[in-house]
Image (tube, rainbow, N blue to C red):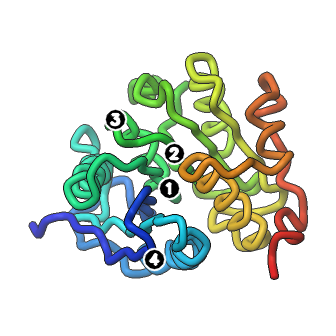
Amino acid sequence: MSGAGIGVGAADAAVAAAVLLLPNGELESTRRPSSLAYSATQPLGRMLARAGRQEGVAVHTVQYRVRGWNGERADLAADAAWAVEEVVRRYGDVPVCLAGHGMGGRAALRAAGHSAVTSVLALAPWLPDDASGVEPLEPVEQLTGRRVMIVHGTTDARTDPELSYRLAGRVKKANAGTCRFEVHSDGHALRQHHDEVLALSADFVFGTLCDRAYSRPVADAFAAPPPLGLRMPLAAGFGRALRP
């Protein structure tokens, strides 16, 4: 089995912060990672790299050893944790945002315990059914003190949005810096409102890594008590005024 890796990242200034993109994966598999899942992270990666270059934000995509979570092995989370260590080795004590989609969203949430991680962005995260009794509850202690944003399409047929809502509720009890946005009528890939999701992601990432001011909807989502701040609708056209 080949080792995990992180793709090339660049910044104009000395690296002051880093984003690790975690591609989607599968529940059980020892096959090589999917090139399609890797490619799906690139629009977000390119946008974040371009927008954060002058502030020294390096953006890397994690290259997993295998594509499966694989039960208690939690291979994707282990690779994410390794990648955080690699960022620290390369750049020193810089803040890190973990940003993952699907099974990569679960890996981002699970690997957040490293002291370098300051924020987690989980897009349509795959989560086990916490009411089934088949698996233990997904841990949340590692998210204490981090900024956490979950984004989920309401018509996602691959990962249940109600599971991410329930997890967000558990996280919010121990961590006030948690919010969740619902993308109405969008599915797992969040394609229908792609531009809005990218703008929301950038708002969160740069707000947590670069001390930029959050937009009003994001600030309101963090401040609102449950369930309002955990069912915040992503408005059509979000971020349009910020685009050239």
> Mark 3 or mark 4, which has the lower sequence index?
4
The x and y percentages for residue 33 are 30, 72
> Mark 1 or mark 4, which has the lower sequence index?
4
Q: Name the residue rendered at 20%, 55% in the picture.
A: 89
Q: Compare residues 102 and 3 and report the one nearer the observer.
A: 3
Instruction: Please tell me whether mark 3 or mark 4 is closer to you in this view.
Output: 4
- Residue lying farthest top? 173
Res. 36 image quadrant: bottom left
User: Disc 1 marks which residue?
Assistant: 99
The x and y percentages for residue 172 are 63, 24
Give me the C-alpha separation between circle 3 and circle 4: 25 Å
Q: Give the answer, above or below, for where 186 lies relative to 71.
A: below
User: Disc 3 marks which residue?
Assistant: 115
Kind of residue at badge 1: Ala
Q: Are marks 2 and 1 in contact (CB under 8 Å)?
A: yes
Q: Which mark is residue 12?
A: 4
